[in-house]
């Protein structure tokens, strides 16, 4: 199951999403070419990645931020940027540019701290924007539970693109994080499942004030859980062209 796009056009240009994607991509191009040897790359990770043991000893607090802009490979980067592209523009549209940036960073730092608590004495460095993007996904679930997301299903030689509600796609993704976390040792490296799950719930919690400002359960009743823009009534899985000059929304709970 791999998401490709959502049927939920945003009402404003997602400048912060563009900025975050550019920072991650350009950063990857820089450090992947500037540190060509394994030793130099290991030193780079040791300096800027989040190491749970060091954070517990309060030796490298800034890595809570820098680690969010480092990735372990091109596929790691590509997957994270795809998820940010799919879900980030709508959350930025709802919150406003600066509040969304703060929301993203707080979700990422919180996700890293959850990972640290799951393996406080680990010396394995943690990198990636997954925790912050998981926070974006948690907020998206609260605001647009029935927005349709096109997912790619691959079974050996069979593949198909199927639109499903966001709450199903995100619910399955979250269940995979819990299942993976319960069956993996965070001290041994690999996927930081608890960072993903933690970031998801942190992002969901941070979105509650915005959801309540929109009306809480009444917002869901008014929109039937669907994206609020009338242009999002689609047939099958085809996405029509949508004008970007939609009316501006009220600012988020923290202002613009």
Image (cartoon, grey):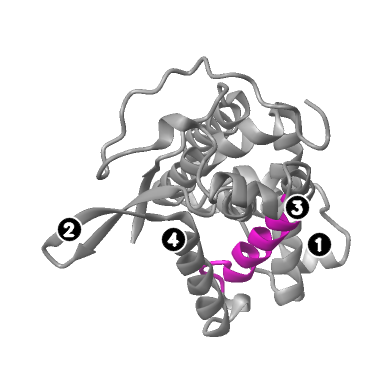
- The residue that mark 2 highlights is 159
Mostly what secondary structure, the magenta segment? helix
Separation (CA) of disc 1 from disc 3 = 29 Å
The answer to whether the residue labelled 2 contacts the one labelled 3, judged by CB atoms less than 8 Å apart, is no
User: Compared with residue 197, is residue 5 higher up or lower down, i.e. above or below?
Assistant: above
Q: Considering only order in the chain, which callout, 1 or 2, is on the residue closer to the N terminus?
A: 1
Please state if 74 lies on the left or on the right of 220 as rendered.
left
Q: Earlier in the sequence, mark 2 or mark 3?
A: 2
Q: Nearer the viewer, mark 2 or mark 1?
A: 2
201 magenta-colored: yes
Local packing at callout 1 (Cα closer than 10 Å; few below 14, some 14-19, many 20+) is some
Give the camera-side residue of 153 and 208.
Answer: 208
* Point 72% across, 49% down: residue: 207
Query: Are dots 1 and 3 in contact, CB under 8 Å?
Result: no
Where residue 203 sits: x, y (%)? 69, 53
Compared across the picture, whether 120 is left or right of 90 comes to right
Residue 4 in view: yes
Residue at (35%, 56%) from the top-left corner? 2
Which sits earlier in the primary sequence, circle 4 or circle 3? 4
Please state the horizontal and vertical placement of residue 202, each as a whole percent of the image: 72, 58
Front in this rendered view, residue 69 or 97: 97
Which type of secondary structure does the marked residue at label 1 adopt? helix
Q: Position of residue 93 (x, y in %)?
A: 62, 31
Q: Disc 4 marks which residue?
A: 169
Span shown in magenta: 189-207
Residue 148: image location, x then y, percent: 40, 49
Q: Nearer the viewer, mark 2 or mark 3?
A: 3
Residue, disc 3: 208
Residue 171, above or below 231: below
* Total marks in image: 4
Q: Which dot, 2 or 4, sits closer to the camera?
A: 4
Q: Which residue is mark 1?
A: 55
């Amino acid at each position: 199951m791999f998401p490709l796009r959502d049927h939920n056009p945003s009402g404003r240009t997602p400048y912060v999403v563009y900025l975050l994607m550019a920072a991650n991509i350009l950063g990857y191009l820089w450090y992947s070419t500037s540190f060509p040897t394994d030793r130099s790359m290991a030193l780079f990770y040791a300096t800027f990645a989040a190491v749970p043991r060091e954070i517990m000893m309060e030796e490298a607090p800034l890595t809570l931020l820098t680690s969010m802009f480092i990735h372990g490979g091109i596929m790691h980067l590509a997957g994270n940027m795809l998820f940010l592209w799919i879900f980030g523009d709508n959350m930025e549209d709802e919150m406003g540019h600066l509040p969304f940036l703060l929301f993203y960073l707080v979700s990422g730092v919180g996700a890293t701290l959850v990972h640290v608590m799951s393996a406080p004495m680990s010396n394995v460095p943690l990198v990636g924007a997954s925790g912050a993007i998981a926070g974006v996904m948690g907020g998206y679930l609260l605001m647009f539970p029935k927005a349709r997301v096109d997912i790619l299903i691959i079974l050996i030689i069979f593949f198909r693109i199927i639109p499903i509600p966001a709450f199903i796609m995100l619910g399955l993704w979250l269940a995979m994080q819990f299942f993976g976390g319960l069956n993996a040792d965070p001290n041994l490296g690999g996927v930081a499942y608890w960072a993903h799950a933690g970031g998801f719930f942190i992002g969901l919690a941070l979105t509650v004030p915005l959801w309540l400002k929109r009306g809480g359960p009444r917002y869901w009743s008014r929109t039937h859980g669907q994206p609020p823009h009338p242009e999002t009534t689609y047939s099958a899985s085809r996405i029509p062209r949508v004008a970007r000059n939609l009316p501006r929304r009220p600012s988020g709970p923290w202002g613009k």
